[in-house]
Image (spheres, rainbow, N blue to C red):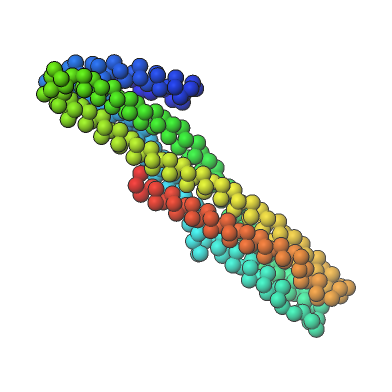
Amino acid sequence: MADPEAPDTGSSADARARLRDVVEPFAAGLVRLDPADPSYARRLEEVRALGSRELDATAQTIRRMGRVTGRYEHTVDDERASVARSLRDLRELADEVVHRSDAGTAPRELARRSARIEAQLQAILAALTADRDRLRQYASELDQEERLLAAESSLLGRYVEMADLLDEALAGRIDALAPTQPERADHLRSDALFAVRSRHRDLLTQLAVVTQGQAALSILVRNNRDLLSAMERAISATSTAIRTATLTAQVLETQVVAGERLRDLAAWANVRESVDRIETARARAAEASHSIAKIESVA
């Protein structure tokens, strides 16, 4: 039996008509064959193998997707991973600066504090930038898997439709045969039609798994974009805080302004808000990656 075309560029009705043109002669030929004829056994093997390549391909794609999301999950959800450490460090530093009082502190001491904060921020900024670049790489891999899974899902759906049409064509011929050849009809029903329906169930089950995988992957891709956007904001806010700390240290060395300048509340408020955004996006992305791990276990 010929494989279905994919991807199809015509209407769904046209595609179904072309599948029917493939299925009808196959069903007619199968019913005419003697069960003792080797050709009959070969046709049943064709039925049992229907869509095998697509079943294997989608299973491999989901497993590969699971490996990518496993690495991704370690990056965004593991509290020991770099993203989590950077967020903790950034939040603690922001809280320290915002809540600490510098009243009565000598300008040189304030300058030393500013220099220390600048150094800590530089380290956090480097870590956040590395994490962002890593997430961009994951985003590229996830986009590729999403496109591949969509193409494979489309073809798998054609095989599901082909099996459905084959069921319909074969059942109709068996029913027509039953009044005159009841034993032969029963044999075809328990042998050939059973094989068709079993394969149809296999294909439907895998298509359901793939559809769930597509939905979860789409959510993960979207959440990762949100996470990357939040990290860009955090990197920008942290860079601003670094410039504030650097300027403050320079000015304080000349004892021109009071220590309150070190605590540029607007800059640090942006830092804290960015951390909150990342935490929210990180939680959503982790939840989506957990869903893909569950789907991979049944693919």
Where's the C terminus, which quadrant? top left
Q: Position of residue 48 (x, y in %)?
A: 25, 30
Q: Is residue 28 above or below residue 58?
A: above
Q: In this rendered view, identify the residue nearer to me: 64 or 222.
A: 222
Q: Position of residue 15 (x, y in %)?
A: 43, 22
Where's the N terminus, which quadrant? top left
* Residue located 52% across and 61% down the image: 81
Q: Position of residue 39 (x, y in %)?
A: 18, 19
Query: Would you say residue 222 is visible in this rendering?
Result: yes
Q: Is residue 292 above or below residue 104?
A: above
Q: In the displayed structure, does residue 40 sit left or right of residue 92? A: left
* Residue located 53% across and 58% down the image: 283
Q: Position of residue 173 (x, y in %)?
A: 23, 20
Q: Is residue 161 above or below residue 116?
A: above
Q: In this rendered view, identify the residue nearer to me: 172 or 277.
A: 172
* Tally of numbered tags: 0
Q: In the displayed structure, does residue 9 sit left or right of residue 277? A: left
* Residue located 64% across and 51% down the image: 229
Q: Residue furthest front?
A: 179
Q: In the displayed structure, does residue 178 sit left or right of residue 115? A: left
Query: Would you say residue 75 is visible in this rendering?
Result: no
Tell me the quarter of the picture where residue 45 sits: top left
Q: In this rendered view, identify the residue nearer to me: 241 or 285.
A: 285
Q: Residue furthest bottom?
A: 104
Tell me the quarter of the picture where residue 271 sits: bottom right
Q: Residue furthest right?
A: 256
Q: Is residue 118 above or below residue 215?
A: below
Q: In this rendered view, identify the residue nearer to me: 199 or 74.
A: 199
